[in-house]
Image (cartoon, rainbow, N blue to C red):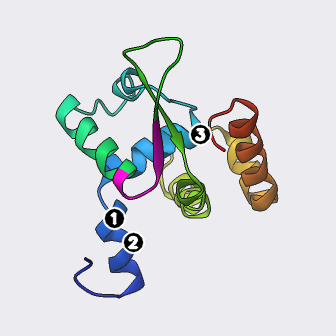
Amino acid sequence: MPKSHCPINFALEIFGDKWTLLIIRDILFFRKRYYGDFLSSDEKISTNILADRLNILEREGFVRKTGDAQHGSKYIYEPTQKAIDLMPILLEMILWSAKYDPKTAAPKSDIAGIKRDKIGFMNQVVASLKKQHLCR
């Protein structure tokens, strides 16, 4: 239960730490889907925090965890609509960071694309996820 029903507090109670949003970023923008994929991110999340955040994301309905038919001992993490619905927030964070971080890692072409047509950019990302069967 959230401590208050302030909309910002409600959101932060669920996904307010950096690791949770970085995992969602990795799923949506970098097409990561396996536990080991997340461990290879530049931010170097520890295994215990990763396991905890993936459990939270699954419990809260942001990701769906399924067994990998090709690799019996592996699980695939795919975004749900709830995770995809965070995309406008993430895109605004990208634009804000591009404005204030002169060393941003975001490709200039992506920043320009987001500025030019945010909805179109989001639709391309979602279409790519669906094409790769990373969301339903």
In contact (CB < 8 Å): disc 2 and disc 1: yes
**Residue kind at label 3, given as amino acid type:** Phe
Instruction: Kindly indicate whether the residue at mark 3 contacts the one at mark 1 (C-beta within 8 angstroms).
Output: no
CA distance for labels 3 and 2: 21 Å
Q: Residue 104, can we see it? A: no
Three-letter residue code for mark 1: Ile
Image location (x, y in percent) of residue 74: 40, 19
Q: Where is residue 131 in the image (x, y as percent from the top left)?
A: 76, 33
Quadrant in the picture for residue 116: bottom right
Above or below residue 121? Residue 8 is below
Q: What stretch is highlighted in magenta?
A: 59-65
Q: What element carries label 2?
A: helix
Residue 29's disc is 3
In whole angstroms, how far apart are the C-alphas of marks 1 and 3?
20 Å
The residue pinned by badge 1 equals 14
Residue under label 2: 11
Please tell me whether mark 1 or mark 3 is closer to you in this view: 1
